[in-house]
Amino acid sequence: MLKKCVLVLALAAAGRPAGAVDTIELKDKAAVVGTILAEKPDQVAVDLGFTVLSIPRNEIVKISRSDFPAAAAKEAALPPAGGQGQSQPAGEAKAGFYSVSGSAAPLRSMRELVNQLGEAVVQVRTPGGLGSGFFINQDGFLMTNFHVIEGETQISAEVYHQRSGELERRSYKQVRIIAINKFADLALLRIEDQDAPKFKRVPMGSADALAVGEQVFAIGSPMGLERTVTEGILSTKTRELGGELYLQTTAQINPGNSGGPLFNLRGEVVGMTNMKITFGEGLGFAIPAEAVKFFLDHREAFAYSNDNPSNPYRYLAPPSRIQHRNPMVQD
């Protein structure tokens, strides 16, 4: 962000509700139902309740995720992430509010991915500066860093739409804050312009599945230069800063990149860029995708109160006071 580039804490540990159920479809038309504990490039670990099963990636056809208990999973009719009437991109599974890769997406060239994902990356503007962001669904919900919109209520988003093979820049002025977590440097926004179309979105990936040395790239607006692509490798995924773990990358990160996505070569968001070492090169950092997904899964706990902008949480109304009367005293 041009206004400031600050060092903040990230929420590195991710979790899922108790009883979450995932369905792994196999090549022989069989299926395994359980809770995914870990995903690696070559295998997926699934908790079956009585044991943990490791399934080779090459045997998996599709992974369907759900954050609902098994008993309620059949009753939950979640629309495809991003809205109605839109086909879901191949290789993605429904996760309700945001999309995730349903199976091991193929590796593609950076040039191909940039052309495909560029529309989903936006520039977030405030009177005090600017940063980056990315759409998580087609209904205008987008993620950015908290420090990009900190202390601001007048927010706009610059989006590039592809029209007849050309990019058309459009500015959306009705951007509302939905949820924030100052300590994890995360903010969920939504474009609410009445004439807003369905937006391109990007799927969320897994930082846990990354390997050190793997190629990654960032798209953002460093120093206000929108749609800038920088590439590098994952230097480490366990860099401790302020007691939390970050992804460290050699992809160039500068003020204005804050809130933008860090992609792997499968086109998945594996992190959110948010800071760099000021007096150094190739020392950029990103919040792991697991922390972003945890924030989105529990967004109601971080709901922003528009009635009281100083309060980042929305609390339930207290119960009415119970009047204790002396049974020996008549009214």
Image: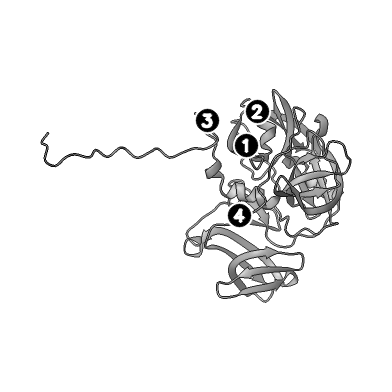
Residue 148 in the image, given as x and y percentages of width and height: 70, 33
**Amino acid under label 1?**
Leu
Residue in the image at 49% along x and 37% along y: 314
Q: Which residue is mark 4?
A: 95
Per the image, label 3 sits on a secondary structure element best described as loop
Residue in the image at 84% along x and 44% along y: 283
Q: Quadrant of residue 316?
A: top left
Q: Which residue is mark 2?
A: 155
Q: Quadrant of residue 33?
A: bottom right
**Amino acid under label 3?**
Asn
Q: Which residue is mark 3?
A: 306
**Amino acid under label 2?**
Ile
Residue in the image at 61% along x and 36% along y: 190
Of the image marks 2 and 4, the number of the one nearer the N terminus: 4
Q: Is residue 20 above or below residue 4?
A: below
Of the image marks 3 and 4, the number of the one nearer the N terminus: 4
Of the image marks 2 and 1, the number of the one nearer the N terminus: 2
Neighbor class of circle 4 (other Cα within 10 Å; few <14, some 14-19, many 20+) is many
Per the image, label 4 sits on a secondary structure element best described as strand
Q: Are marks 2 and 1 in contact (CB under 8 Å)?
A: yes
Can residue 225 be seen in the rendering of this structure?
A: no
- The type of colouring in the image is one colour
Q: CA distance from mark 3 to mark 2?
A: 14 Å
Neighbor class of circle 2 (other Cα within 10 Å; few <14, some 14-19, many 20+) is many
Neighbor class of circle 3 (other Cα within 10 Å; few <14, some 14-19, many 20+) is some
From the viewer's perspective, is 309 left or right of 123?
left
Q: CA distance from mark 2 to mark 4?
A: 28 Å
Q: Which residue is mark 1?
A: 189
Viewer-closest of 161 and 279: 279
Q: Are marks 3 and 2 in contact (CB under 8 Å)?
A: no
Q: Are marks 1 and 4 in contact (CB under 8 Å)?
A: no
